[in-house]
Amino acid sequence: MNLDRQIQRVFGLKKSSVRPQEQLLPMSDTSLAFMGYPLLRQAEMFLTVPALERWRTEHSLAFPQECCVCLRPVQRFLTVHAPPGWLGFLRREQILEGVPHCEEHGRQDEAQLLVQVNVWSEWVCQFSLIGLNAEFLSKTRQLNQTGDMVPPWKAFPGYESTSSGWRQGNGEYWLVHVWSSFWRSLPPAERQQYTQRWEAPSEWRSWLMEFS
């Protein structure tokens, strides 16, 4: 099922024919107005180790205890399902459980949240959340960015420290946009603890000393 059909199924929205510059709503970098959905917002994130383990074991993420649509107090927790299978006959897989809703917005059987998951490797998982409330999405992203980000030698075990994979494709994107910001946020003492905790091979210890 393509994205337009998924959006219509989950949110009941149809693509607008109005160009983004003609929209009355304020634009932001999370807006899907450029796709024809000015009411929708998107948040992308790569899960840290604790968040990834939670999703694997519980099919859940850390959510703010507010309705995902209006931020009112939570009354119900709903599930995000994968799109229906061939002709809708196949059983829908549960992608994410425990999405908070208020009484008004939780009357349906499925969460008002669209989730796309891209698994790049055993330890690298990209989530794209599409919803109606930018603040809820932002808080969800922050809650799932705590704890360690897996190190490069675990993220892409087929790549050595000098591999060209770090200069192109998924390896480059992850290193530049995900791991490097995590590493640079660590004070020197925590960097040392991190390399010990993840048992950095000698070649990677040398690489880390030169990485800036």
Image (tube, rainbow, N blue to C red):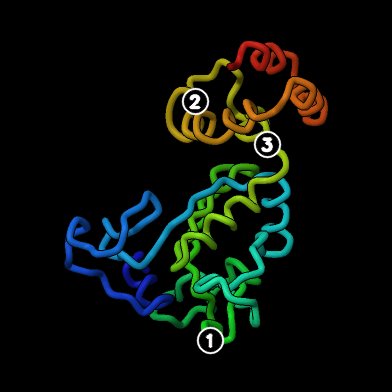
Q: Residues within 10 Å of mark 1 (few under 14, many from 20)?
A: few
Question: Which comes sooner in the sequence, label 2 or label 1?
Answer: 1
State which mark lies toward you, 2 or 3: 3
Left or right for 209, reference 140: right
Residue matched to label 3: 150
Name the element at disc 2: helix
Name the element at disc 3: loop
**CA distance separating discs 2 and 1:** 48 Å
**CA distance separating discs 2 and 3:** 17 Å
Q: Amino acid at mark 2?
A: Gly
Q: Are marks 1 and 3 in contact (CB under 8 Å)?
A: no
**Residue 36: image location, x then y, percent:** 26, 63
At 48% from the left and 54% from the top, the residue drawn is: 43
As drawn, the label of residue 95 is none
At 54% from the left and 43% from the top, the residue drawn is: 120
Q: Amino acid at mark 3?
A: Val
Pick the quarter of the image with the C terminus: top right
Left or right for 43, reference 145: left
Residue matched to label 2: 165
**From the viewer's perspective, is residue 127 above or below residue 101?**
above
Residue matched to label 1: 104
State which mark lies toward you, 1 or 3: 1
Q: Are marks 2 and 3 in contact (CB under 8 Å)?
A: no
Name the element at disc 1: loop
At 31% from the left and 58% from the top, the residue drawn is: 26
